[in-house]
Image (tube, rainbow, N blue to C red):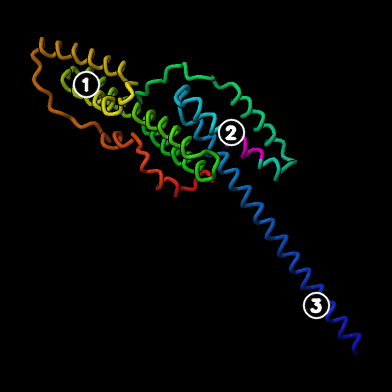
Amino acid sequence: MAIFLAAIVILLSALACYAFISQSIEKKMIQKQRILMTLKTKQRNLVHLINGFPPNFLTTELLSLIYRALIDACEQLSKIEPKDPRHLDDITLYTNQLGTLPKTNSAQRPRVDNPQQMKEIRQHLQELQHFLAQQEALKIINKVQLGAYTDQVKRLSLQMAVDAYLYHAKLAQQAGKLRLAIHYFTLAKKLLIAENTTRAYDKQIAQLDDITAKLEEKARLANEAPAEIETAPDTENKRKDVIAADDMDSWKKKQIYD
């Protein structure tokens, strides 16, 4: 009888041990799948972010930071799925693309004159700012670096807002509304002046002065009456695209690129 009871106890213990091991294996598999999904989502987001901007739009510094994060995600995927050759292929691809980035931003930033593309780029700039906040939160970059990167994003956002005004100015010119065009050129100039503490926008401001002076003369010769100011669609949102560093705390709450 004692032997029988001992056998039952051993059997129950074995079953309990088996159940425990099975649960542990299942938990590890679930955890592995979660990590894989997170990394693959991160990879897709970063690729989407890179492809979301026109060529020569982002600075080399910003692109390099994104590529390094992308390569890191692929390396982690390769460790979890060592038999999947796609991860090594991706590492090679993105490493080569990182290596071919220009050392300096010598190419001129393209001017955007498509409303839909403007909207998409503004969204991507917000995603980029979220990404920067996450990089700082993960201690990949420090606060000084974050400030430098954020300043670059602010400049790009400013130029997008200026491009929007220039687009509406161009439409007004094509419609023969010279004073309305002058109005939009003036709004673009005001944006640049407000952010011109380092004199970086002197050339653009001078160009806008020259354009508005010529349009003023044409409007005077044509005896064009003062324009009824038409508000550009989404004007306030365009102005808000000049991102303030004070908003960083709210961006840090986003976990898109964890």
Disc 1 residue type (three-letter): Ala
Residue beneath the point at 37% across and 28% down: 155
Q: Residues within 10 Å of mark 1 (few under 14, many from 20)?
A: some
Give percent across and percent down for residue 189. 25, 23
- Residue 100 in the magenta stretch? The answer is no
> Which of the two discs, 3 and 1, labels the residue nearer the N terminus?
3
Give percent across and percent down for residue 42. 56, 42
Q: Which residues are magenta?
A: 68-75
Q: Nearer the viewer, mark 1 or mark 2?
A: 2
Position above or below: 185 against 90: above
Residue lying furthest bottom in this view? 1
Query: Are the two marked residues, 3 and 2, in contact with CB atoms closer than 8 angstroms?
Result: no
Q: Quadrant of residue 70?
A: top right
The residues tagged by marks 3 and 1 sit, at their Cα atoms, a distance apart of: 84 Å
In front: 125, or 103? 103
Disc 3 residue type (three-letter): Leu
Residue beneath the point at 46% across and 16% down: 107
For the stretch drawn in magenta, the main secondary structure is helix
Query: Are the two marked residues, 1 and 2, in contact with CB atoms closer than 8 angstroms?
Result: no
Give percent across and percent down for residue 203. 31, 15
Q: Residues within 10 Å of mark 2 (few under 14, many from 20)?
A: some
Residue position marked by numbered label 1 in the rendering = 172
Give percent across and percent down for residue 106. 47, 16
Residue position marked by numbered label 2 in the rendering = 68
